[in-house]
Amino acid sequence: MFFFNSTILFGLFAALIPLIIHLLNLRKLKKVEFSTLSFLKELQKSNIKKIKFKQFLLLILRTLIIIFLVLAFARPTLTGVNILPGSSSSKISSVFIADNSFSMSYLSDSGSLFNLAKKHVKNIINQMNEGDEFIFLFTKDSSVTTYTKETAINIINNLTITNKIEPLEKKIAQAISILNESHNTIQNIYLFSDFQKSTFSIKANLDSLNKNFKDKNINLYSFDLSQDNPTNINIHNLKLLNSIVETNKPLTFSTEITNQSTTSKNNIIASLFLNNKRVAQRSINLKKQQTKRIEFEAILSKPGLIEAKVEIDDDNLLRDNAVFLNFNIKEKIKILIYYDNNNDIQFLGNALKVSSSSNRIIIEKIRASNFLKNNLKEYDIVFVVSSKLPNGKIISNYIKDGGSIVFIPPSNLNYQNYNFIRNELNLPSLKNIIKTSSKSSDYSEFSSIDKKHPIIKNLFNNNSQTEIESPIIYNYLAYERDNNYTSIIKLLNNITFFGEYKLKKGTVLFLNTDFTLQASNFPIKGIFAPLISSIISYLTTSNLEKNNFLPKEKIPLNISELNSPIIDIFLPDGNDKLSITNYNERKINYDNTDQLGSYKFFNSDKLIKFAQVNYNIKESDLTKIGAEEKEKIFTKYLGENVININVENDYLNELKKSRSGTELWRPLLIIAILLALIEMYVARNTKKDISNLN
């Protein structure tokens, strides 16, 4: 037996009130004169004894009335006992925590663990009564409550696997919090899980859980659905190793495959797909608990959005058998050349024409004397070959927002002009301007080249030659050394010839000589045109890492320049739409990312964002939480009301007995009312007897 409102039991002290009143009344004695006749004295003694008995009976009745009323309001309940005459059946509040993380999709001999969990939940629900409270908590931020069995069954039938990881003890804490608000006498938590270690951390404040369990009679029933020695092979960490992505050139992909099983696995087939077309395949063998890195090579024939996927053969856990990577090779590259003199851009223009032979590159030229556009976002790259910037903030904002600038000194550059440009473009400080005659022997050459930099590395792809013939440089800018930028090519006197620095999201590349033959023979060297082409490819290759997300992470979308208020979203399995209502916002977040795979965002048929969602690798490790750790959480921290259920046994009868209970408040209240009626009758008779004595 337990009392649902145990604090009301303090009201039992009120049972002392009738006794106190009775004792006080004994002190108020009245003297009554009687006749000296003996038979009257005997009659008086007999009546007094009768009155005293009735007063004692009233004392007992009034005390019992208070006791039974207090007990009735304390709601005593007998567990394990079904309906007694005059009593009421206890209502039950049941919280079901069904672990629907994707490790529960593991296929056992009896089906998936998730479907087994749903089966057990429905068996328990079918044993319960209409009007009981059914509360469902899943391993994602949602809860559902119902009081009908049919609705409860429908909720379970509609439950699906989620790819998000959420600690189970967080759900236990939520369940306790909900039950603390419930007024039903029997309160149970049913937990169904494979007790995967990664989804059952102990970072939550479990001391508060312990207190809540002891304050109320809450039982936790634990259903362990895990398998002994599970087998699983997962693939993860898909990368494109090329820093520069171009068509008709080899691309190298790498990925890792892990054998999470306790036995070796041979002939594991991994396939690379590009835009749903298989382009490469590998076979590997793995020892138990071994991870191997493999590479694939492929060639793209045309630009556009590339959806890469590496997939392995099906095993017991399907959701970690594929990994995704999206990247975009722009179909059109728009370049702006902002210049002072035609002679300064003649060789640059010729080199760009060679790169634009496929009609992918669109070139626009604006002379510095003309107005510079306020919005440069339509350009992928801006070549600045000028000492004049009418509004430098336009270019600096363009860089900060992710734009790419290539600064080439104009032939007429001087200290004053450079310092103005330097402040706007955040270029390195200038030590000196070197100018020598083309007939002089006092010239400079390349001294060192960073061959690991993607721009330089791209020059030697599929080429055995790794040396670059240095040009002769007569006129150049001697930049001060600065740790904020990277030197890609240096001259003999340790002066940076070609450098790079990052400004927030943008990139700035800078050279130290103009592209005229008076300054150097660089424009007519064999490296010139390939270097310009490599620069374009480098600056138009997107950062692949920023497009990778985990399930339920938010994908940021820039909505500052939409053509319409509707964003069409192509999901891995289905479509979605976003309606933009607040145009004052520059960015919004899209959080419907539970599906694994490729996400594409279009506005007026224009691709504005792409991303991929990959599973959390922690879910692939099917290692169970240790027995001691589990006992620590369930027993030491959550009290003694924890029952481990073996689903192989007849657990339904065991649960049926534990859920049976009878509330006694109604018979106790009836008894209190009957005692009150008897007390009224005895009190009336006692009062009449006392008046007859007088």
Image (tube, rainbow, N blue to C red):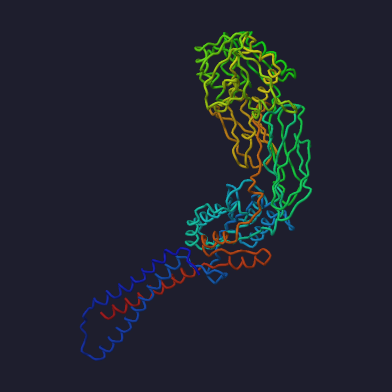
Is residue 127 visible in the rendered structure shown here?
yes
Looking at the image, which is closer to me, 29 or 634? 634
Looking at the image, which is closer to me, 684 or 494? 494
Direction from residue 662 to residue 41 in the image, left or right:
left
Compared to 528, does 486 lie above or below? below
Is residue 405 visible in the rendered structure shown here?
no
Instruction: Identify the residue at image location x=61%, y=42%.
Output: 552
Image location (x, y in percent) of residue 627: 60, 61
Q: Quadrant of residue 692?
A: bottom left
Instruction: Identify the residue at image location x=44%, y=68%.
Output: 71
Q: Quadrant of residue 682?
A: bottom left
Image location (x, y in percent) of residue 374: 56, 16
Q: Which quadrant of the rendered structure holds the C terminus?
A: bottom left
Image location (x, y in percent) of residue 146: 59, 53
Instruction: Identify the residue at image location x=73%, y=32%.
Output: 251
Image location (x, y in percent) of residue 541: 66, 27
Direction from residue 60 to residue 493 in the image, left or right:
right
Q: Quadrant of residue 475?
A: top right
Residue ranking furthest to the front:
441
Looking at the image, which is closer to me, 429 or 649? 429
Direction from residue 487 to residue 76 in the image, left or right:
left
Looking at the image, which is closer to me, 239 or 359? 239
Compared to 91, does 540 lie above or below? above
**Number of marks in the rendered image:** 0
Compared to 101, does 372 lie above or below? above
